[in-house]
Amino acid sequence: MPPIGIHDLSVATTHYALDLRELAAHTGVDVDKYRLGLGQETMSVPAIDEDIVTMAATAARPIIDRHGADRIRTVLVATESGVDQAKAAGLYLHPLIGLPATARVVELKQACYSGAAGLQFAAALCAREPDQAVLVIATDIARYDLDTPAEPTQGAAAAAILVTADPAIAELEPVSGIFSADVTDFWRPNYRSTAVVDGKLSITAYLAAAASAFTDYRRRGGRGFDDFAAVCYHQPFTQMAYKAHRHLLEGRGRAPATAALDSVLAATTHYNRVIGNSYTASLYLALASLLDHTPDLTDRPIALLSYGSGAVAEFFSATPAPGYHQHLRTQAHHDALAQRKPLTYDHYRTLHRTQTPTDGAHHTLPEDTNAPFRLAAITSHKRIYKTRQPNELRSRLSHFSQTRGVRPGCDGSGGGFGGSACGGMR
Ligand code: HMG
């Protein structure tokens, strides 16, 4: 059987970012709690006309542009912030990124874990039929209630991964360790737009699940920690990676120094530190961060630990392929972060409070994001997405770079849906 794994990896995030210094100035919390205690600096916040579909399209489009869509036989969208209870988000993507009619399209859910399930399903499909490619997209918006301890751990991003035989970036190794149990540490009932979380329980549940998944991985013949050049963890906040790695090592009788933790973790945290939690996408942002910020990992195995509250954990590994560097999208990832627009606290709160209209009337959304895809309207309960043409995109971005900063009328005074250019919905 040929090696199977990650042939391409592309990350996208939102139009806006909130600096946690801005949040701390209003909550009265010492900013070091956010920056040092949680390991977070800023968090991505979606514009009125962004959602998991627009982020997924923005992440996946460069993959289609590079490889074409003909070989794609399956599209798996992993998300816990789905836009519809019946229709898969991947079908909204279909016209936006030109997916083939001959690809099966489904949505996967299990909190932050389902991206890893998507990768394993994709690997199995490619093993059965090595000519096919599977597009796995992890896309999420992490939202908690305002004025709660979880508020600084919000964020949003998408990671699109093309899985094929003979991958250009990294081979997925066949051994994996799994742990599943019924735990109510974090959940979101259908009637809520924000998650409910027992913060302390969620941390102990994560640690216990990670340890059990690693034990299962070892039992199945997996590698020892010393074999890994780096370890990518699901990062609801980047200090969680440090907690988890320390926990796994201590469980094996080792007491790691901070420098030893940094050597396998620091490079995995650059993107999540400035994006915040992106649920299903977080682990793949850690992988992209590692690959984009490490000189050479060729043939050096990398461990990955996926955790999704509720709870499922999986420990698996990937080995970067010779020449993988030429296939990375480092500059595009840096540009996506640099192009985000800083939010004022008031504007952030306005965006957070804005709800999707449920009345079935026609609602045109204000043009807020500069992204290539946007949610343009909701009409008769249908979501209408629009693709920006390259010239329109160029002119928006050039206008944006000249006027970077807070636009007049975007200071949070805009209000709700259908109001000012800053009002709207989520
Ligand atoms: P909290 O209770 O407000 O924070 O909420 P804390 O008091 O525990 O402080 C956090 C850290 O900051 C502590 O460090 C403090 O000592 C430190 P630690 O003891 O953990 O090493 N600290 C400071 N450091 C420097 N200077 C200071 C200072 N003050 C305090 N002045 C909590 C923290 C994470 C619980 C909260 O943000 C939360 O509920 N977040 C959401 C839940 C979450 O992220 N859970 C993580 C594990 S579950 C998971 O990953 C799954 C998830 O992604 C969902 C899914 O699967 O879909 C969430």
Image: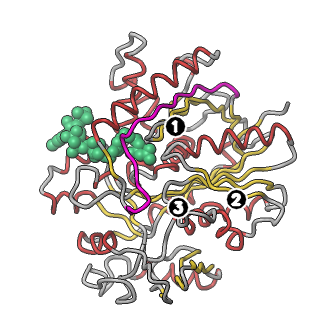
Residue 162 location (% of width, % of height): 71, 50
Which one is earlier in the sequence, the residue at label 2 or at label 1? 2
Q: Work out which quarter of the rendered image holds the N terminus and state it.
A: top right
- Label 1 is placed on what type of residue? Ser
Q: Which residues are magenta?
A: 174-193
Query: Distance between the Cα atoms at labels 2 and 1?
Result: 23 Å
Which one is earlier in the sequence, the residue at label 3 or at label 1? 3
Left or right: 102 as drawn, with respect to 351 = right
Name the residue carrying label 1: 306
Name the residue carrying label 2: 63
Residue 379 counted in the magenta span: no
Is 98 in front, or is 75?
75
Residue 339 location (% of width, % of height): 45, 68
Residue 188 counted in the magenta span: yes
Left or right: 50 as drawn, with respect to 273 = right
Check mark 1 vs ligand 1: CB closer than 8 Å? yes or no: no
Asked whether the viewer can see residue 38, the reply is: no
Name the residue carrying label 3: 82
- Label 3 is placed on what type of residue? Gly
Residue 236 location (% of width, % of height): 39, 45
